[in-house]
Amino acid sequence: MASAQSLYKRGVKHHESGQLAQAEQCYRKVLQKQPRHADALFRLGILAQQTGHAPAALQLFDQAIAIAPRDDYYLQQGNTCQTMGRFAEAVTAYRNVVRLNPGQAMALRNLGVVLRQLGDHAGALESYRQALALEPDNARANFGVGGCYKYFGLNHQAINAYRRAIARDPGYADAWNNMAEVYRVLGDFEAAEAAYRETIRLQPGYHQAHSNLLYLFSYYVLKTPAEILAESRRWDDIHGAAGRAAQYVHQRPASAVERCLRIGYVSPDFRRHSVSNFFEPILTAHRQLGNVEVTCYAEQIKVDEVTRRLRGLANHWCEIQGRSDAEVAARIKSDGIDILIDLAGHTAHNRLGVFTYKPAPIQATYLGYFATTGLSAMDYWLSDEVLTPLDSVEQASEKIVRLPRCCLAYTPPSGAPDVSERPSDQALVFGNFNDLSKAGPGSVEAWSEILRRLPHSRLLLKAKQLGDAEQREAWWRRFEAEGIARERIDLRGRTADRQEHLALYGEVDIALDTMPRTGGATTAEALYMGVPVISLAGRRFIERISTSMLQAVGLEELVTVTVDDYISQAVGLGRDKTRRQALRKGLRQRITGSALCDARGLTQALETAYRQMWRQWLEPDTGGTRGVVGD
C-alpha cells in the first residue's frame, strides 16, 4: 500500500503535468491517511483556485495555515483574497508573508496592490519601494510606484516610473496606457496619443485603451466630429464583434404601449463622482414619480455612502464587476429591461461591450460622456436643445434626442458652507477650479488679457495637477510669457476635503471657464457658492455644457460666443462691483429655484422621451431608430 508521502509526490507530478483530476484524487487519498497533511491541503487549494473555485481554495489554505503557518501558504491565501475582492484580509495575509520572509518581493508588490484598492496610497508606495529595494529592475513594482505617484499628482515622477517599467518590459501594455493617462493630465496630448496607440498596437483587444484614445480626442476637441465618429466606429468594429455575433432578438409584445417600463442604467460611477451628482436626483425622482421600474447595473470598484444611497433608491440593484460582457448581457435580457441606458460612454471602466449584445430592445447613451459611442447597437444619444442645437456639428451613430429643457439636474452638496461676502477692500480675484488639462490653447492668453486690463486683479487656479512643483512652475512660466507676474497667479493643489474645496470659493469673485472644453459639475458648484461663471460657447456638446447650465439658471448674459466677448464680459463684470455683489447674494437661491436643480422636471422629460422611444419601437414600420444628425 502506497504511503502518504508517495501518494503526495504522485499527486504533485499529476498536477504539474496538468492531470488535475488524478492529482486531486491523490491529494484526497493523502488526507484520508493523514488529515493534517498541510502540503496536501495547500495543493488542493491551488487546484481549487486553478479550476475557478476561489472560496473552496481559501478554506483549504486556511486549514493548511492552521497546521503549518508558512510564508508560501500565506502568499496564496493573500492572492486568493485579492482575487475575491477581500482586500483587508489580503493585507493581513501578505503582511504575514513579509513577517516570516522579509525578502519576499512578490508579497510586497501584491501588498501594494491591495493597499491601493483600500485607498492607502502612502502605504502602497512604501510597500512598492520595499519591493524595489529587493528587485530594482522589477517592472511590476515600478508600475505600482507610478500609480501611486499618479494618484498624488506627482506626474513627472509617475512618467519616470512608467518609463522604468517599460524599459524592463517593453511590451507592458498597462504601463503604456497609464503613462498616456499622465501625459493627458499634463496636457501633452501628442505624447498621450502616441502612448495610447502603442498600447493598442501591443494589445489590440485592449478595449479600455481604445476608449481612452476616444476620450482624449473628444474631451479635448482634438479631432473633427467626422474623425471621432470614424474612430468610434472602429472601436465597435473591433471590440463589438463578439456581441454582434450573439446579439439578442427582441419580440415586440402586443398591447404593451402604456405598461410600466423597465429601465436599466449601467455605470461604473455609482459612487462619489460627478456623474452621481447629476444622476442621484434623477433616481430619486424616478422613485417618487413611480412611473418606471429602475434597475442599476453597477460596475462597482469602490463603494461609499453615495453608492449606498443610490442602492436604496433603485428598485433593483445588480453588481456586474468581474462578470463578462456576455454574462451581464444575459442577466439584463433575463431581467426583461425595455430601455438600457449607458451612463459612461468611452470613460474609465465603461461596459459598452455589454451593449454590443443588444440585451434590451432600446439602448441609449446619456450623461457621463460627450460624444458618440460609435456603437451600431446604440439607438439614441440623449441631449438637449442647447448642447446639440439643430445646426450642431456633432456626428453620431445614434439618433440625437433633444430634451426641451436642460438635460442635467444638479444636486447641491450637503453641508456646503454658506456663501461668504467678499470684502470690498480686497483685490478682485478671478478663479478656475477645473482640471487644468481642459485649459486648451487660448485659455492662458485670454485670462492674461483680462488681468492686463484689470492690473490690480489676481487669478486663483485650483487643480490636482498643481500639487506637483514642476507643474506649478510650468504654469507660472506660461503666464510670465504673457507678461503676467507670478505673484498675481495663485496656484493651489488638492484640498484636504470637500468642505475645504467649497470654502475656497469664498476667495473668488468671478469664475473664468476653461476653453474649448467647459466646466460641468465645477460650473454648477461655483454658481451654488455664489460665484458667477463667464463661459465661451463653442459648437460641440463638450464646448456647451456650461452654456446649457447658465441658460437653465437664467444667466444667458454670462455666455459669450467669441474670445473678445469673453474677455469683455469678464472685464465688465470685474469693474461692476454692485452687479457682482448682487449676483453673489442671490445666486444660491437662484440656482436652487431654477431648471438646473429641477430634478423632477428633468425626470418627467426623460420618462416622456423613454415612452416615445418605446412607442416608436413597438411600431415596426417607423424606418428604424438610428441615424446621423441632420438625417
Image (cartoon, grey):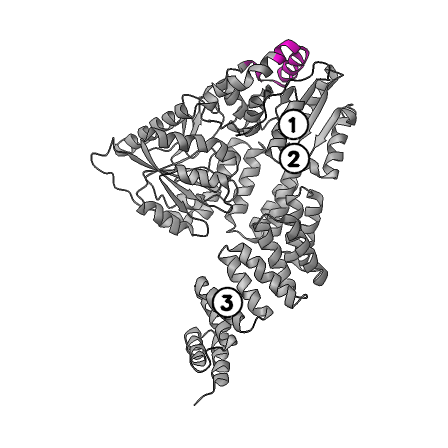
Q: Please indicate whether residue 69 sits to the left or right of residue 266 in the image.
A: right
- Name the residue: 65% across, 65% down: 99
Q: Please state the horizontal and vertical placement of residue 184, each as a whole percent of the image.
A: 63, 39
Which quarter of the rendered picture does the C terminus lie within?
A: top left
* Label 3 residue SS: helix
- Among numbered discs 2 and 1, the one appearing first in the sequence: 2
Residue under numbered circle 2: 495
Residue at x-position 55% and y-position 42%: 212
| Residue 105 place in picture, x, y as percent | 65, 63
CA separation in Å, label 2 and label 3: 42 Å
Of the numbered discs in the image, which one, if any, rests on residue 62? 3
Q: Are marks 2 and 1 in contact (CB under 8 Å)?
A: yes
Residue 267 rendering spot, x and y as whole percentages: 45, 41
Mark 2 → mark 1, Cα distance in angstroms: 9 Å
- What amino acid does circle 1 point to? Leu
Choose the circle earlier in sequence order: 1 or 3: 3
Q: Magenta residues, as a range?
A: 557-581
